[in-house]
Image (cartoon, coloured by chain):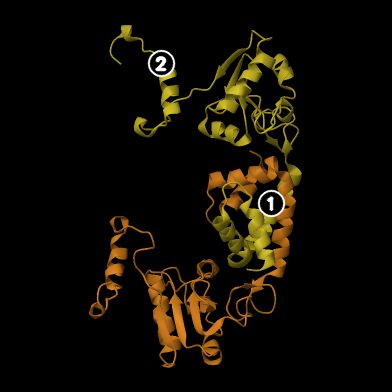
Chain colours: A orange, B yellow
Amino acid sequence: MTAAFDHVRQLLKQLPGLGLRSAERIALHLLAERPERLGPLLDALRSAASALRRCPRCGNLCEGELCAICADPRRDTRRLCVVERIPDLLALERAGAHDGRYHVLHGKLSPIQGVGPEHLNFAGLAERLDEEGVGEVILALSNDIEGEATCHYIRETFLTARPAVAASRIGFGIPSGGALTYADPATLKNAIDARRHWDTAGGAC
Amino acid sequence: MTAAFDHVRQLLKQLPGLGLRSAERIALHLLAERPERLGPLLDALRSAASALRRCPRCGNLCEGELCAICADPRRDTRRLCVVERIPDLLALERAGAHDGRYHVLHGKLSPIQGVGPEHLNFAGLAERLDEEGVGEVILALSNDIEGEATCHYIRETFLTARPAVAASRIGFGIPSGGALTYADPATLKNAIDARRHWDTAGGAC
């Protein structure tokens, strides 16, 4: 293959979810099979890159002064959901699972990978808790050691001093439609730990 | 999400192998998480698009006058391998399966999808057969009805009048490492049809 083609393929391969074969397929598509698609894509990426920035309040993507969620007066400001990354926010939005605002950390604490609090978007979180009338912080962070550590840090740094703000962590267990047979041991343990007791006094379920 | 972001996501989703989620992930990666990767990728795509063209002889990608394979004097010009697409050529090259030259059709005949001979790269094929000293045409086309029809067309149009040029079609059957249990009926039928008889006179295998 030519050097120019190989360079494109190598850069595409660095993108998330793309291996050498899929990067090659996309490079061939844009450079040989459907070259008419390349110009519009380059234009869209270039103009999006100059139009988009991080919402100064929550860290979500935005084009204007604030992101669409922070700027939406219908969002319930009492519940603030903390997520690691924008895709997590998008997934919760698609699910319609949260009608409050978000705070995007852009990562999670990881001493092993050298990610400390100074690398995460904690800027303004204290002010938000004090000024936006937040009654509950929902920690929607990963179900792993780093997610756990990040939750612990947030509790110690932001929540211990604010007893009026409730804190919760999203539930862990068997996913919707998931079969116990195929669940891994950690998930099964989570599911047992997160069991909800029934009120059997009321009668049959 | 913002309009600029959504536009990028929609265009990325049109690329082969990308769905909405993977397109979104790549858009976020380039626009929010690793924006420093966007510039080099745009530059590489832009310069590759202006540097690359189809090899006028075989239809492969090339930067110079001919592609690297057509320009390579070590390639065996006696065997010409006809493929549908450049990725097929790349796969054969990676496998080291063919040391001759190629001819890339950029598609296959498909009356249902309105693809006739005039849409495929048959230009120059007759001249190549006459001038390059081709002794065998290896038809490395898909194992489906369209691939079959394309082979038939090539035979009638180019090979019947040239009895000195041998023609072959690549073998079909169980892939390397493949288990019979999971093979589909058409593959199993191909495999039986393509069976090779052993020379049992020589002793045990």
- Name the residue nearer the viewer: A78 or B50: A78
Q: Kindly indicate whether the residue at mark 2 contacts the one at mark 1 (C-beta within 8 angstroms).
A: no
Residue at 67%, 57% (x, y): give it: B40
| Residue B41, x across and y down, in percent | 66, 55
- Residue holding disc 2: B196
- Residue holding disc 1: B44
Check the image and report above or below for B184 versus B42.
Answer: above
Quadrant of the frame with the C terminus of chain A:
bottom left
Q: For the residue labelled by badge 2, is the local secondary structure a helix, a strand or a loop?
A: loop
Check the image and report above or below for A27 versus A61.
Answer: above
Quadrant of the frame with the N terminus of chain A:
top right
Check the image and report above or below for B77 versus B177.
Answer: above
Instruction: Report if residue A137 is visible in the image.
Output: yes
Of marks 1 and 2, which one's residue comes earlier in the chain? 1
State the separation of the CA atoms marked 1 and 2: 48 Å
| Residue B81, x across and y down, in percent | 60, 23
Classify residue B186 as left or right of residue B145: left
The residue type indicated by label 1 comes to: Ala
The chain under label 2 reads: B
How would you rate the neighbour count of disc 2 (Cα within 10 Å): few for under 14, some for 14-19, many for 20 or more?
few
The residue type indicated by label 2 comes to: Arg
